[in-house]
Image: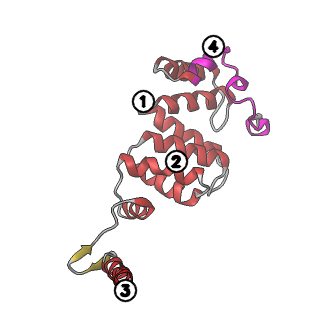
Amino acid sequence: MIRIAAFFLLLASAVTAQTVEDEYGTLNPQDTGWGKVLSNIDNGVTDMTTCASGYYMTKSGRHDLARRLFRTCAEAGYTGAMTWMGQLDNNGLAGPYDPDAAAAWDKRAADLGDPVGKFNYGLNLLRGHGVTRNEELGRAYVDEAAQDGLRIAKRLRDSGYDPNEVTPDADEWKYAPLF
């Protein structure tokens, strides 16, 4: 009998612990989990934890949510979100395949000093993918990323700037010149 009473007491407390919004504010707001992350994005709240959770969204195949989160975070200045927007655009995830937009996101991150943005944009320039091919400028971006300590940039530089060294399984059709 005590177990049954305890169960109903627990059930009643779970019901009263639900988030309730009314004219006086929010009672028991969700403060963890996906619900909190989505609430933050819906309300334009960007912080490191919220923006970093986009990684798990995209890795779990929730590209629409990841794109929404990364766009909000990128617009707020998070360079890691900018490089993820580039990844989503470059692979057509939850949007069209758009190498121009991908390169623009990478350049934006690079211009703000992000080593991954520098590396990605340098690789774009080396390939002429999403931007006009410019090997000299591409090498300069890769060199900056290597100076920043990005190991994959050092690897690309040390290979003589051969993109196949860092993306051996890349879809070559993507990077072929269009004219």
Residue 136 seen from this side: no
Q: CA distance from mark 2 to mark 1?
A: 21 Å
For label 4, the SS is helix
Judging from the image, the colouring scheme is secondary structure
- Give the x, y percent position of residue 6: 34, 80
User: Which of the two labelled residues, at mark 3 and mark 1, occupies the earlier sequence position?
Assistant: 3
The residue carrying mark 4 is 158
In the displayed structure, would residue 13 be above or below residue 33? below
The residue carrying mark 2 is 55
Q: Are marks 2 and 1 in contact (CB under 8 Å)?
A: no
The residue carrying mark 3 is 1
- Residue at 37% across, 59% down: 32
Mark 1 nearby-residue class (10 Å; few <14, some 14–19, many ≥20): some
**Magenta stretch, overall SS:** helix
Q: CA distance from mark 1 to mark 4?
A: 22 Å
In the displayed structure, would residue 105 be above or below residue 17? above
